[in-house]
Image: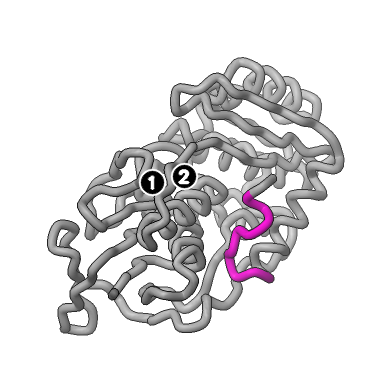
Amino acid sequence: MNVLVLGAGYAGVNAYYALRGKATLITDSSTFKFYTAYLRNLLRVTPYISKLPKGAVIERINDLDLKGKWIIVGGRKVQADKMVIALGCRRPRLDQLLRELRSSNRPSLGVEYNYDEYIAIQALLYLRQRGLEVKYCGSPLSWLGEEVSKVVDDSLSEVGVRVGESCEFQLTAPEPHELIGRFLSPGPSLEVEPGVYVAGDLLEGPKLGELAMRMGTVAGLNASGRAKVLKPIFINILDFGKFGLHIRSDVPWGGTYVSVKKSPIRRLMKRFIEKYYLWRKGRMGILSFL
């Protein structure tokens, strides 16, 4: 059986691992990039690139058909029996934005897409740890539940991050991959066509590495014939310098579960995670149980 995994970000590599290597991983990138660690470069130089899983095929995908289960690469058509589409989203201005924030003396930042608020908050927290006066324009993650919102709001005040309006910089909304053209909303099996599964930032909702990894694992297991369903949950650690906030919530998907844990240990957990995923080449492994 010819199974193709398209994309080698958080979702793609974990789909490939779930398929136990019995698939072809195709990507136009020669490395795995861990963007959680990438963002930390606002504070200090932090490694964020590792090698791809062994056997990855580095080629640009020129076209694809979900119903027909085929792709065009290198001028040739490749037919698949099953596919996992994990091509992610586009953020064409992200690198420029981070450069501008790094060079600003009093950076202020908002978002176009509410689900990106956690990214903007963490970016400003790193800049605050450099001693800069920073301002955040947005809600304190109110879409994750009232408990989360209150703790985040109080914690921002505690470390001196101002909350206001009219920010100088804005994190623009993510864009769907050009070969798909829209964000998708599959069911809990992540199947969009018979034998075709989607995972990661290509889906509607929060664009979050931890969530994308879980999606990739579920999609890969389903493509291998082991029936699984996704139980989406937002899990993220915000580093406030003195402490970390470990946030869990399924509220964006209609649930009621909310957990916020605050301690210096949570900040250290974030540092461990940054190193773990580079060492493991993106494999979620034991961290799926955290």
Q: Pick whichever, 101 or 263, lies toward us.
A: 263
Q: In this view, does 167 lie to the left or right of 70?
A: right
The answer to which quarter of the image holds residue 62 is: bottom left
Q: Is residue 159 left or right of residue 257?
A: right
Label 2, secondary structure: give it.
Answer: loop
Query: What residue type is disc 1 on?
Result: Pro
Furthest-left residue in view? 68
Q: Residue 174 carries which label?
A: 1
* Residue at (39% x, 52% y) in the render: 199
The answer to which quarter of the image holds residue 36 is: bottom right
The x and y percentages for residue 281 are: 60, 70
Magenta segment: does it hold 198? no
The x and y percentages for residue 136 are: 60, 31
The x and y percentages for residue 266 are: 79, 42
Range covered by the magenta-colored residues? 279-288
Q: In which quarter of the image is the C terminus?
A: top right
Query: What residue type is disc 2 on?
Result: Lys
Answer above or below: position of 109 versus 77: above
Answer above or below: position of 164 versus 38: above
Q: Please give the residue where the numbered disc 2 appears in the rendered image.
A: 207
Answer above or below: position of 98 versus 54: above
Magenta segment: does it hold 284? yes
Residue 230 in view here: yes
N-terminal label among 1 and 2 = 1
Answer above or below: position of 251 versus 202: above
Label 1, secondary structure: give it.
Answer: loop
* Residue at (36% x, 45% y) in the render: 189
The x and y percentages for residue 92 are: 39, 56
Q: Pick whichever, 268 or 69, lies toward us.
A: 69
* Residue at (24% x, 46% y) in the render: 182
